Amino acid sequence: MAIQNGKLLYHLTCLENFESIIDKGLLPRNMTNNFRDIADQEIIDFRQANGLNSLVPFHFFAKNPFDGRVQIDNPDQNFIYICVNRNYARKNNFHIITMHPIALNDNLILHDYDNGFNLIDWETMEQREYQDDYCKNVCMAESLSPDPIDPSDFFCIYVKDSATEKIVKDVTLSYYEGLPFYINVMPNMFLE
């Protein structure tokens, strides 16, 4: 399926952050403390300087350049994807940045969901040519939630193996009567 026609948005995080997320929701960086931050310092500083640290970022597909880089840089960590439905994002006034925020620099614009979606260079994104700077930056387009996201609004969580699935399930059931989202084991979505 073409990325443009996908149904989900993807937020990569460390498994060690999961219990806090289940307890407090998926929060923007400026509302969190004591969490494992996987982004590099340059993007953290850029987000803070440009007011993006008050938004919760998602990407349009898994295994994008950001996801690969943080998994390589943190080989000791177990990662999960928290996903929301794109219809949920649209209804809840998510913003869109059409490529990696630093690549836009002075032209950084937070578009409303529909306008931003139509402005993304989907043809280039589909190529996934990470050696090409323009394509790499387009592949890191973001959809950003202006509000914290309650776990009951997650569509699903992707994990790499059954051991991680059990942890996610057990933690979730310690806070909820039943699972409010799907948990899917998809090892091919993660680096080995």
Image: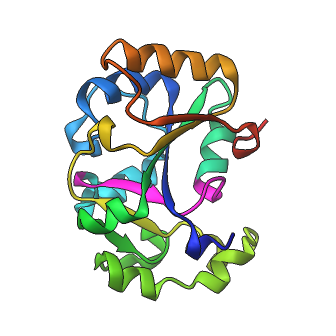
107 vs 181: above or below = below
Q: Quadrant of the N terminus?
A: bottom right
Residue 140 image point, x, y percent: 54, 66
160 vs 53: above or below = above
Q: Quadrant of the C terminus?
A: top right
Magenta-drawn segment: 54-66
Residue at 33% x, 26% y is 22
From the viewer's side, name the closer residue of 179 and 170.
179
138 vs 165: above or below = below
Display colour scheme: rainbow
From the viewer's side, name the closer residue of 147 and 168.
168
Quarter of the view holding residue 52: bottom left
Residue at 53% x, 16% y is 167
Residue at 36% x, 27% y is 35
Q: Say whether residue 60 is left or right of residue 159.
A: left
Check residue 58 for magenta coloring. Answer: yes
Residue 38 image point, x, y percent: 49, 39
Quarter of the view holding residue 58: bottom left
Check residue 110 for magenta coloring. Answer: no
From the viewer's side, name the closer residue of 42 and 186.
186
Q: Say whether residue 95 is left or right of residue 65.
A: left
Quarter of the view holding residue 50: bottom left
